[in-house]
Image (tube, rainbow, N blue to C red):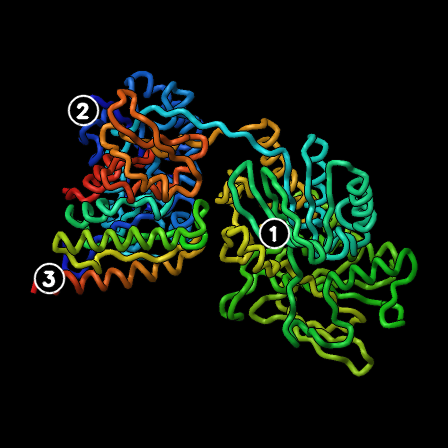
């Protein structure tokens, strides 16, 4: 993997954040092609072990594109997803990984620009982490 | 288990939408030797009837037990291919769609090599997930035979009546004092000269006598919960909150006319008015003389494309779209004017005439009747000033006469203002509907799913989704009736079977899943062999969000279609190096 790139696994949600990510494509916005998206029903249902598995398999970072307050399932989805993030970061630390390799932000069904911004910013963070780890 | 699977992989060119930026044949080549893949093909349009038939034939001939289609967003064609799988005798949940258009080709157009590598990774992930699919059955739920319509303009009124005729109960919300929207203010309308006020009056009279329709005026939608087929909503009517239970929601909140800046196309000069204002003057004039400011009107100049087809270089936030109705509405207003007083001189300053379909006949009638059409260039738009005699003087370069500079004096300038989206912040917050770059509500697909939204059970119609003339607005309202009525008339809806499942061997009953489930879908039971207590999921109650999954210390809970094994193998497949 070139040092100026970072592979990101995105967990999106079927009804909210995945349409937002689709909209970025529909509007021909650009973000790094090393970003790959896996969709799930709700961001509160992500297993922490999936985050660890992705990092150990070779992804540089995991981004949870959460439903936020738009979640069709839960009004307190943000809190519950926050718990998932806390558990996942703890698991990453336990296995010797930097917890900053996991990031969560609410991406709504029209948050195309926001998603692109997050991907660009998170890529920079991960490149920095990779450089620091290599030093 | 995975080695026994027989998977078919189909990669779509999407007529260039994908293949212009992704080497589709390279994706196919990379996938054909994947474990479990027995067929790997490309199609120009996988969604076409011909391609679907070829895939159906192949599923039978090759005895496939799972398929992956790599094409557009699942939001567009997931159901198309699930139906195709069913027609081929395959369980529809052994099909996976991989999005290599919106999430690949369209967003990495600058880098074909990287987009192709990403497509290979994504399709590999789809194959890995599909290899672990199991045949599943839908979960059936009862739907409520009631529809909430937000917005009682022409589209909302018409939709209400047809839904009521279908035997459904309708709650019709209007935020103004009276129903009818813009159309109730208009007189003769194209193409058949029916009066807007009379048409609305007839619709409202029918609605007021219908036992199936309840019309709420001064009403707002303030809360929505629940899901497709069974929404709990709250409306506020004159300060009172009313709870309602409906199976579907249709949004017909309409448009507002473009608001001009000072001096834009002469706005602010005496005698410069908008087309909606002119229609009110025509309406008030009846069949007599046309009067404005107490004086008879002797000449009218219509200016087309005002607030529509704006150019990036001219405006901060331009309305790039065509408003569709204004050419024909201006021409028709000119013909109505002629019907009142044939001696009135008429000019049309236009960029392009878009009186499409049969409305072309109105354009022809206007030209044959003596209206002068002058074509202006947006690079040198007409200049307006107040003449000393109180009329409006216009300087325009007419492209049809070799950019001849012409000067006109006219009693009235009518600016054919386009349609712009309404500001519906409160409603947007309640319904969470996606809004397009033009500011109107976004349908899933303008041609294939033109009134459906990403929020299941919530439909959009009329000019809330973009500029339309009245006939088009009513057509889309009827499409939303067809969709919502079809859903609710059946009395049930089949939901995807993606709900929680418990591995009884792993479960040791700690109660955390029961505690966290917001729906009460989990209870404690004794295992079949009586050896221990375990969790039981009530499938009809479970929504499949999966919030119980991460809290299980034993990893005993999965969501069907998103199992631990599927997600981890998908991650492994996507990260595998592409040679």
Q: Position of residue B224 (x, y in %)?
A: 55, 48
**Which circle, 3 or 2, is nearer the viewer?**
3
Q: Nearer the viewer, residue B105 or B489?
A: B489
Residue that carries the numbered disc 3 in the rendered image: A133
Q: Quadrant of residue B175?
A: bottom right
Mark linked to residue B3: 2
Within 10 Å of disc 1 (Cα), the crowding (few <14, some 14-19, many 20+) is many
Residue name at image x 88 percent, y 60 percent: B285
> What number of labels is visible?
3
**Which circle, 3 or 1, is nearer the viewer?**
3
Query: Helix, strand, or loop for circle 1?
Result: helix
Residue name at image x 69 percent, y 45 percent: B172
Residue name at image x 20 percent, y 21 percent: B4
Kindly tell me whether residue B28 is visible in this rendering: no
Q: Are marks 3 and 2 on the same chain?
A: no
Within 10 Å of disc 2 (Cα), the crowding (few <14, some 14-19, many 20+) is few
Q: Quadrant of residue B396?
A: bottom right
Q: Residue furthest bottom?
A: B388
Q: Quadrant of residue B276?
A: bottom right
- State whether residue B47 is above or below residue A110: above
Residue that carries the numbered disc 1 in the rendered image: B464
Q: Chain of mark 3?
A: A
């Amino acid at each position: 993997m070139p040092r100026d790139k970072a592979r990101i696994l995105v967990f999106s949600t079927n009804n909210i954040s995945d349409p937002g990510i689709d909209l970025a494509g529909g509007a021909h916005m650009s973000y790094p092609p090393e970003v790959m998206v896996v969709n799930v029903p709700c961001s509160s249902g992500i297993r922490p072990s999936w985050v660890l598995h992705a990092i150990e398999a070779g992804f540089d970072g995991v981004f949870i594109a959460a439903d936020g307050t738009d979640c069709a399932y839960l009004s307190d989805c943000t809190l519950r997803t926050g718990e998932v993030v806390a558990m996942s970061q703890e698991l990453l630390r336990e296995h010797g990984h930097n917890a900053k390799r996991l990031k969560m932000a609410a991406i709504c069904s029209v948050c195309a620009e926001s998603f692109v911004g997050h991907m660009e910013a998170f890529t920079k963070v991960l490149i920095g982490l990779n450089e620091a780890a290599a030093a | 288990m995975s080695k026994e699977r027989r998977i078919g992989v189909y990669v779509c060119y999407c007529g260039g939408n994908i293949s212009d930026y992704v080497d589709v044949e390279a994706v196919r080549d990379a996938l054909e030797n994947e474990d479990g893949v027995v067929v790997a093909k490309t199609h120009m349009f996988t969604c076409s009837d011909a391609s679907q038939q070829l895939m159906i034939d192949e599923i039978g001939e090759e005895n496939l037990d799972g398929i992956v289609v790599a094409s557009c967003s699942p939001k567009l064609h997931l159901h198309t291919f699930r139906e195709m799988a069913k027609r081929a005798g395959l369980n529809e949940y052994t099909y996976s769609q991989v999005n290599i258009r919106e999430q690949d080709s369209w967003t990495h157009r600058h880098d074909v090599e990287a987009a192709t590598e990403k497509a290979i990774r994504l399709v590999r992930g789809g194959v890995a997930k599909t290899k672990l699919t199991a045949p599943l059955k839908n979960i059936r739920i009862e739907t409520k035979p009631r529809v909430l319509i937000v917005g009682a303009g022409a589209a909302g009124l018409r939709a209400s009546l047809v839904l009521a005729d279908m035997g459904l109960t309708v709650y019709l919300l209007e935020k103004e004092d009276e129903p009818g929207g813009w159309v109730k203010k208009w007189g003769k309308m194209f193409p058949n000269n029916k009066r807007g006020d009379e048409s609305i009056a007839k619709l409202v009279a029918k609605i007021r006598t219908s036992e199936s329709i309840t019309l709420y005026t001064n009403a707002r939608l303030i809360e929505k919960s629940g899901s497709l087929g069974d929404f709990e909503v709250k409306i506020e009517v004159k300060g009172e909150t009313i709870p309602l239970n409906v199976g579907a929601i249709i949004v017909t909140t309409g448009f507002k006319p473009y608001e001009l800046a000072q001096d834009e196309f002469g706005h602010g000069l005496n005698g410069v008015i908008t087309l909606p204002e002119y229609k009110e003057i025509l309406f008030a004039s009846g069949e007599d003389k046309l009067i404005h400011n107490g004086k008879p009107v002797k000449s009218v100049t219509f200016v087309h494309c005002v607030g529509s087809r704006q150019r990036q270089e001219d405006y901060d936030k331009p309305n790039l779209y065509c408003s569709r109705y204004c050419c024909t509405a201006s021409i028709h207003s000119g013909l109505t004017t002629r019907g009142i007083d044939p001696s009135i001189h008429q000019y049309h300053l236009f960029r392009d005439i878009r009186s499409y379909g049969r409305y072309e006949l109105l354009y022809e009638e206007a030209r044959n009747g003596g209206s002068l059409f002058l074509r202006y260039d947006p690079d040198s738009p007409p200049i307006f000033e107040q003449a000393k005699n109180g009329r409006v003087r216009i300087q325009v370069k007419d492209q049809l006469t070799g950019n001849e500079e012409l000067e006109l004096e006219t009693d009235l300038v009518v600016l054919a203002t386009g349609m712009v989206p309404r500001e519906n912040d409160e409603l947007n917050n309640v319904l969470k509907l996606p809004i397009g770059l033009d500011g109107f509500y976004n349908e899933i697909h303008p041609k294939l799913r033109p009134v459906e939204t990403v929020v299941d059970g919530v439909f959009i119609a009329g000019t809330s989704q973009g500029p339309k003339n009245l006939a088009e607005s009513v057509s889309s309202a009827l499409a939303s009736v067809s969709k919502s009525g079809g859903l609710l008339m059946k009395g049930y809806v089949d939901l995807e079977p993606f709900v929680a499942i418990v591995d009884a061997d792993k479960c040791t009953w700690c109660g955390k899943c029961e505690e966290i489930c917001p729906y009460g879908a989990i209870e404690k039971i004794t295992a079949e062999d009586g050896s221990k207590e375990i969790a039981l999921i009530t499938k009809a109650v479970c929504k499949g969000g999966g919030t119980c999954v991460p809290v299980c210390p034993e990893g005993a809970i999965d969501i069907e279609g998103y199992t631990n094994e599927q997600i981890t193998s998908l991650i492994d497949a996507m990260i595998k190096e592409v040679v």
